Image (cartoon, rainbow, N blue to C red):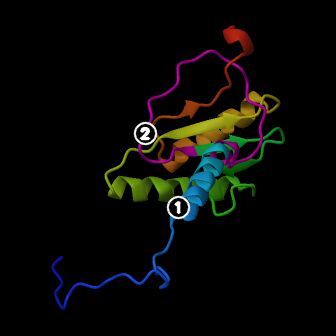
Amino acid sequence: MYHSKYTRKRNPRRAIAEMNVVPYIDVMLVLLVIFMIATPLLTPGVKVQLPQAKAEALADHSNKPLIISVDEQGLYYLNTNANPQQSLSAHDLVVKVAARLQIEKSQGEKSVVMVKGDTHASYGQVVGAMVLLQRAGVAQVGLITQSPPNGGTA
């Protein structure tokens, strides 16, 4: 057996100074699964009862869509607002949407603007939101609906 001054014999009594990372990997995998399950449940925005209609889903876009919600009292909410649960006046809605459109236009992105109206909101309230979006410079607006149960038409 060849021994040099650079090789060492292991002392069987000496403690091994290596860290076992297997428990950390297990914890990370459990956290990953928890977050994967919890993320779809965290839908931000105002709770509105959507009208049901059979329609095709829009293509997925890279940037977050701008969603204006109209609740049954006719109050306006914006999903990109600092507090999406706080209602906005008509003037504030126009200003914030116009600012968002300017920012995205300067970055070369195309904005997707959607209106989410409560089933119990009047037609005039939802159209009023669309008029405000037109004042802000929005060219196209989509309406968010909920698919009817059993795939029927509504």
Q: Which residues are magenta?
A: 38-66
Q: Which residue is mark 1?
A: 22
Is 90 left or right of 8, judged from the image as shown? right
Work out which quarter of the rendered image holds the N terminus and state it.
Answer: bottom left
Q: Which mark is residue 61?
A: 2
Q: Nearer the viewer, residue 22 or 143?
A: 22
Q: Is residue 58 above or below residue 64?
A: above
Q: Is residue 57 above or below residue 67?
A: above
Q: Nearer the viewer, residue 104 or 152?
A: 152
Q: Nearer the viewer, residue 144 or 97?
A: 144
Q: Is residue 112 above or below residue 26?
A: above
- Give the residue type that dot 2 points to: His
Residue 55 lies in the magenta-colored region: yes
Quarter occupied by residue 82: bottom right
Is 83 left or right of 10, judged from the image as shown? right
User: For the point 69% across and 61% down, which residue is it?
Assistant: 83
